[in-house]
Image (cartoon, helix red, strand yellow):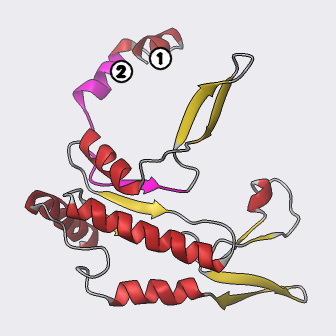
Amino acid sequence: MWDYFVRNGVEEWELDWFVQNPVKLDIIGLDYYQHSEHQLRRGENGERIDETAEHQFGFAHLAREYSDRYDGVPVFLAETNVGGPVEERVAWFDNLVVETRNARAAGTPVCGLTYYGAIDHVDWDTALRVRNLNINPCGMWALSWQGNKLVRTPTALVDRYRDYISMPIAESVGELASPDAAARVRAVLEAAQRP
């Protein structure tokens, strides 16, 4: 990238500044969806095809890779959901809780897990480019039209989420197996609570 930046107007002394002043990450927020893992292949005419991977590694594996790449920094599953029937959303969330438990048991400093969004999305089927007011079911609360008003209704995913957050950590996402990982997570969470 160095040559690319220099060819496109960034001075070498500017790049040197970044080398001399590296920023250490405190935490990495990861998005993880069913379509997050990709594979590349060549088509019949030699074209590059980018598609969802047939054989996926899973969140636990990728969380470890990201943490390791950045010297053991804690990771947080910041965004995930799946569209479709509520049963599929509950199954997806249950799977990610298991993946988080597996990652923590293996010593990966996973310090958080969330489900995004709290409510169904509107017009995400067109990437918000067209205002057609379509409800895209993916949230913990379902949206429905009542007249000209959107109304939220809790789904079974709300109950499942409440179940998990009421459990002791050891029963939900599990304790961190590595004392070093636990110390890193504790340090990040304590810093976040300071004014």
**Looking at the rendering, in which quadrant would you find the N terminus?**
top left
Looking at the rendered structure, the secondary structure element under dot 2 is helix
Residue occupied by mark 1: 5
Q: Say above or below: 40 vs 37.
A: above
Determine the residue positioned at 28% across, 60% down. Answer: 103
Is residue 110 something one can see in this rendering? no
- The answer, for residue 192, to whether it is visible in the render is yes
Vertical relation: 83 (above or below) 139? above
Based on the displayed image, in which of its 4 quarters is residue 66 positioned? top left
Q: Secondary structure at mark 1?
A: helix
Residue bearing mark 2: 15
Seen from the viewer's position, the closer of residues 155 and 16 is: 155
Residue closest to the eye, 88 or 134: 88
Residue shown at the point (44%, 89%) measured from the top left: 162
Question: Does the CB distance between marks 1 and 2 fall below 8 Å?
Answer: yes
Q: Position of residue 125 (x, y in %)?
A: 77, 59
Q: CA distance from mark 1 to mark 2?
A: 8 Å
Crowding at dot 1, Cα within 10 Å, few <14 / some 14-19 / many 20+, comes out as: few
Q: Earlier in the sequence, mark 1 or mark 2?
A: 1
Amino acid at the residue labelled 1: Phe
Q: Is residue 14 above or below residue 119?
A: above
Figure label count: 2
What's the amino acid at mark 2?
Leu
- Span shown in magenta: 13-33
Q: Quadrant of the C terminus?
A: bottom left
